[in-house]
Image (spheres, coloured by chain):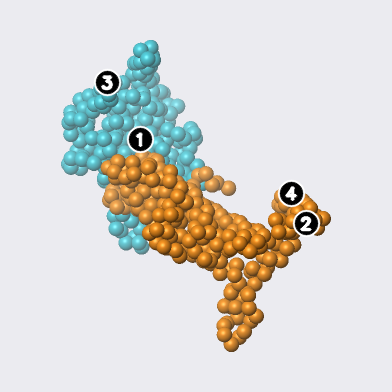
Amino acid sequence: MTHIEVKAVNKVFKTDSREVIALKDINLEIPQGQFVCLLGPSGCGKSTLLNAIAGFSLPSSGTITADSKLVTGPGPERGMVFQEYALFPWMTVEKNIAFGLEIKGMPQAEITAKVDQLLGMLSLGDFKHRFPKDLSGGMRQRVAIARVLALDSPIMLMDEPFGALDALTRRNLQDELLRIWAELKKTIIFVTHSIEEAIYLADRIVVMTYRPGTVKRDMMVDLPRLRDPSAAEFNALKRELGQLVMEEQQRHHNDEMRIAAVD
Amino acid sequence: MSKQDWRQAASGAVVPIVIVALWQASAMLGWVNPQVLPSPFAVVHKWIEYLLPLTAYDPATQSWLAWALSGELLGDTFSSMYRVVVGFAIGAGLALPLGLLMGSSQRMYAWFNPLMQVLRPIPPIAYIPLAILWFGLGNAPAVFLIALGAFFPVLVNTIAGVRQVDGIYIRAARNLGVSQRTMFVRVMLPAAVPYILSGVRIGIGTAFIVVIVSEMIAVNNGLGFRILEAREYFWSDKIIAGMISIGLLGLIIDVGMNKLNNHLLRWHRGLEN
């Protein structure tokens, strides 16, 4: 069953002096429960596409539907995990997770039960009453994931969520995410520029081109889970994807040099 | 207190002790006219007199507590504080909602900001003649001036506080599905609190200055009134005793504000300790 459908989506950003075509004719059909990674260098429009699906910044033309409903704005059925965590610093861990439930009007007893369950699931129990400033990056991102899980949204959108973490914490959270995904059967769209991360996590990798953002390659990853990043098949795929991504990175680089020369 | 704290306190006491000793010595040696500068002992003596009840305790007419608090200093402190609290509550109470509106709505900002920019540089003291003309003498003009003094710092900081709210919080909240009202009350407002509190702090400082000045002009009690009254009788010891009281009160307010700040901003990154 198709869960998210992106149809003929274009996105143009206009500034005073020029137009940037961020997305050009993107078409994707994502079935229920699929783990999709959008992969590409900065400027390839992967975050733009994610923001369009999230409803923060709607397409200039084309349509996006989620659960057969047209996306017209952000909503809790498409929970988002941001790279910058975006936790509310004035709320404790517990309150951050509970916030989405409170505004839904869930009874307090149910909220407490749900929050406690999520604190357990993400090993956050000891941090319940802490404020975000007292947590490490990895812990903050756990809270952000718990906050989205609390909403029971069938779709999870993740914008380079582990980009700011050190390699070990990152692997640790990737494993947690895979465990949660296997348990809760969510549809996940995960933006990253790390080839290894994409191969490690995804059922399907969508490689995007640098300006205008188009789909360069849409491929399934058939390696059995849990994947071993040192395995030969893993590395063969990594080499192949590396080439695709670096072509786009090179275009990004050339473009930057050209703009610098004009200025 | 640790040994280091004691040492720090001791080194902080050196300069005041030396100054007071010099002051006392110059008084004792007759270098200055006591009418111009009374000795520290005279000031302390006067301060205690100012603090203590004026009449002897009479159980027939009043309770013990009322008698103990009947001293002039306590009465003046109460009057001054009453004006500060009421004036500040009015000023900040108007500035906060207006600031939230102006900070979050471009249209409101466009409507009100030019007027604010014109009014803001006028010191509250400059409103004294108008305040007396409008409200006569008594508490009303004093409260008006204090409210005015508190209004602008709170307003300006609230606007800045709302405007600097990180867009990521707003996006996260929209993603969670908050209504416009919830966004305001539970996201924008708390995110703006660090700015608002610094506005409150400046506002209270201004209110404290304004209360002393307005008491010198518009009313016949309070700390500001008392030191001006003392000048008419050439009671320089009482002037200084009053000034010390004003200083102590300011210090207490500041410490209280600091405690409140630390409590309300215990989540804030800048206060890690």
Q: Residue at x 28, y 38 (%)?
A: A56
Mark 3 touches mark 1? (CB < 8 Å): no
> Which image quarter: residue A44?
top left
Residue situated in front as seen by the camera: B3 or A8: B3
Q: How far apart are the alpha carbons under marks 4 and 1?
A: 59 Å
- Mark 4 near mark 2, Cβ–Cβ under 8 Å? no
Labels 4 and 2 positioned on one and the same chain: yes
Image position, residue B54 (x, y; %): 63, 75
The chain coloured orange is B
| Pointers 4 and 1 within a single chain | no
Chain of the residue where label 1 is placed in the rendered structure: A
Residue B75 spot, x, y in % from top left: 56, 69
Apparent colour of chain A:
cyan
Q: Please, what is the three-letter code of the amino acid marked with disc 3?
A: Arg
* Front in this rendered view, residue A84 or B2: B2
- Label for residue B27? 2
Q: Which of marks 3 and 1 is nearer the N terminus?
A: 3
Q: Residue A18 carries which label?
A: 3
Q: Mark 4 points at which residue?
A: B15
Q: Is mark 1 on a helix, strand or loop?
A: strand
> Which residue corresponds to mark 1?
A159
Residue at x 68% of width, y 61% of height: B237
Alpha carbons under labels 1 and 2: distance apart:
74 Å
Q: In which quarter of the image is residue A42?
A: top left
Q: Is mark 2 on a helix, strand or loop?
A: helix
Name the kind of residue labelled 1 in the image.
Asp
